[in-house]
Amino acid sequence: MLKKIFLGLGALLALLIVGISGFFAKAYFSTESRRNTVYKVNLQPVSITSDSAELAYGNRLVTAKGCRDCHGDDLGGKVFIDDPKLAFLVGKNLTKGKGGLPEEHDINDWVLALKHGIRKDGKPLLLMPSHEYTLLSEQDMSAIIAYTQSLPRIDREFPPQKIGFLGRILTEIGKIDLFPAEMIDHNRTLLKEVKAEVSVEFGKYLSSGCQGCHRANMKGGEPIAPGFPIVADISSTGNIARWTEEQFLQTLRTGKTPEGKILKPSEMPWNMTAAYTDTELKALYLYLRSI
Ligand code: HEC
Ligand code: HEC
């Protein structure tokens, strides 16, 4: 009898091990195949001007759209996830120095990255939030490209990216969006420009920069990655409904909410929203309270 139970338990354990390794193997091969998918897209030409007003606007946008959070303050690249289980991910060196973009990297390659989330070879960029940047107007995208193309060379090299086993499993079960290219409508044309004014429409446009974490409906939810806090509801059903416009502006500039909560810039990137103009924040306030 005892022997039978042991045999039974042994078989169960063996089954469990086979099951787990089978699931991991599936996660491994499926993430590898998604990573090697080659996207073919029709490139929409974007023209740029590089006068000083355009460069200054591009510089501000690069802060306001969060590029520096992942690519470093000087955009010379930085490691932004370094957890052997999860991944080793580098926000690429965006200058043309050593370890940066290749010499021949041109405007079209920029559009591939920002609008489509892919590299020159058509393969998807990892975790680069292009599903947000694809919603930028042509005017804003072109200013960002003009500015980043004008950057001085910075030599900074990194080891290659790696995806850990937990990163693969979380990707497989849909808890991490490792391949933003999959979420993009590649046939969409860019809006020409969006009028900067205190309107719901402009607020909605700006909210694409919040979507990645607060979700399309702005109601937040589960943490964006293990170790991060629950994402707050910032629609009219969240705390914002009770805040005055002034309190909203203050929160997004100082990281301190009217309830006295201190927001960490590494979790809620308010150093990014601190670069927004009054008009932009007021438009966001209008929009968020309208939904
Ligand atoms: C959440 C972090 C994050 C943010 C925010 C972010 N990036 Fe990235 N970006 C990455 C990562 C990671 C890579 C490297 C992906 C890879 O090699 O698979 C990358 C790669 C790139 C590339 C390289 C394309 C290539 O061909 O190798 C460009 C260009 C780029 N980002 C531009 C930008 C710009 C401009 C912004 C702001 C508008 C921005 N990124 C914001 C994470 C980010
Ligand atoms: C990288 C992810 C991320 C992005 C991008 C992001 N947020 Fe957040 N935000 C969070 C998280 C996480 C919290 C909750 C932080 C906490 O509980 O400590 C939060 C909290 C907030 C809060 C405080 C809400 C409350 O009730 O206390 C406001 C307001 C807010 N975000 C507004 C915005 C706006 C507006 C944008 C876009 C311009 C934005 N966030 C973009 C992650 C993000």
Image: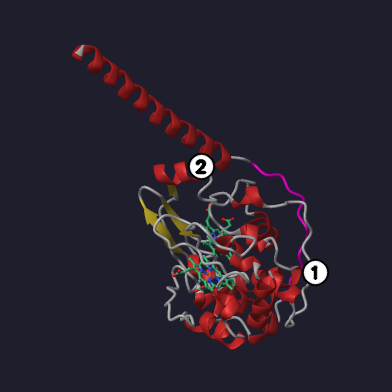
What residue do we see at 55% from left, 85% from top? 247
- In primary-sequence order, the first of circles 1 and 2 is 2
Dividing the picture into quadrants, the one containing residue 238 is bottom right
199 relative to 205, above or below: below
The span shown in magenta is 38-49
User: In this image, 52 relative to 247: left or right?
Assistant: right
Q: Position of residue 288 (x, y in %)?
A: 65, 73
Vertically, is 250 above or below 142? below
Disc 1: which residue:
192
Q: In this view of the protein, can residue 74 be seen by the observer? A: yes
Which residue, given by chain and number where applicable, does mark 2 sit on? Answer: 173
Q: Give the side of residue 32 with respect to residue 195, left or right.
A: left
Density class for disc 1 (Cα within 10 Å; few <14, some 14-19, many ≥20) is: few
Mark 2 belongs to which amino acid? Ile
How many other residues sit within 10 Å of disc 2, few (<14), some (14-19) or many (≥20)?
Answer: few
Is residue 45 one of those drawn in magenta?
yes
The residue depicted at 41 percent of the width and 55 percent of the height is 226
Q: Is residue 119 visible?
A: no
